[in-house]
Image (tube, rainbow, N blue to C red):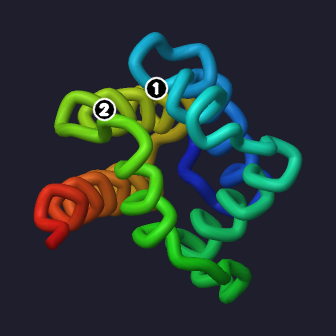
Amino acid sequence: MKKDILNREDVVKLVDEFYTKVQQNEKLGYIFNEVAKIDWVHHLPKMYAFWASALLGEQSFKGNPMLKHILLSKQTTMSEVEFNEWLKLFHETVDELFYGQLANEAKFRASNIARNMLNRINNQD
């Protein structure tokens, strides 16, 4: 039986599963692996901190993901197609692993993040 996201270990599990899918995804993998050339050893702990801060109230994340994505959008297409794929994979991963209030909150926040990033990318001067 699935449980809710309760602690940092659950966040790590979610992030690891999600980014494994992202790396292998036809629409997204090249953005992370070839364009951004993500160093996963350093990137994943940042994502743990981001989601632990967002969902568990930790104050462990520092950074400006919006700026990083805006800069990345100048190197490759980041349209509604890519953000919808990211969101689909995120929701799918949450639903496969968890059920409950924080699981729903994770999906809600991911939806807002995707919408806000796409909006900022589309409305650059």
Residue at figure coordinates x 64%, y 60% from the top left:
6
Dot 1: element = loop
Label 1 crowd bin: few (<14), some (14–19), many (20+), radius 10 Å: some
* In front of the other: 125 or 82: 125
Q: Position of residue 122 (x, y in %)?
A: 14, 56
Find out whether the residues at labels 2 and 1 contact each other: C-beta distance under 8 Å: yes
Image coords of residue 58 (percent x, y) = 67, 83
Residue ID for mark 1: 28
Q: Is residue 118 above or below residue 89?
A: below
Residue beneath the point at 60% across and 42% down: 36
Q: Quadrant of residue 66?
A: bottom left
Residue 78, disc? none
Toward the viewer: 46 or 69?
A: 69
Q: Earlier in the sequence, mark 2 or mark 1?
A: 1
Separation (CA) of disc 2 from disc 1: 7 Å
Q: Residue at x 44, y 71 (%)?
A: 67
- Find residue 117 and report its horizontal and vertical position in percent: 29, 60
Q: Position of residue 116 (x, y in %)?
A: 23, 64
Is residue 18 found left or right of 107 in the rendered image? Answer: right
Tell me the residue that label 2 is attached to. Answer: 82
Q: Which quarter shows the N terminus?
A: top right
Q: Looking at numbered disc 2 in the image, what kind of residue is underneath it?
A: Glu
Please tell me which residue lies in front, 117 or 96: 117
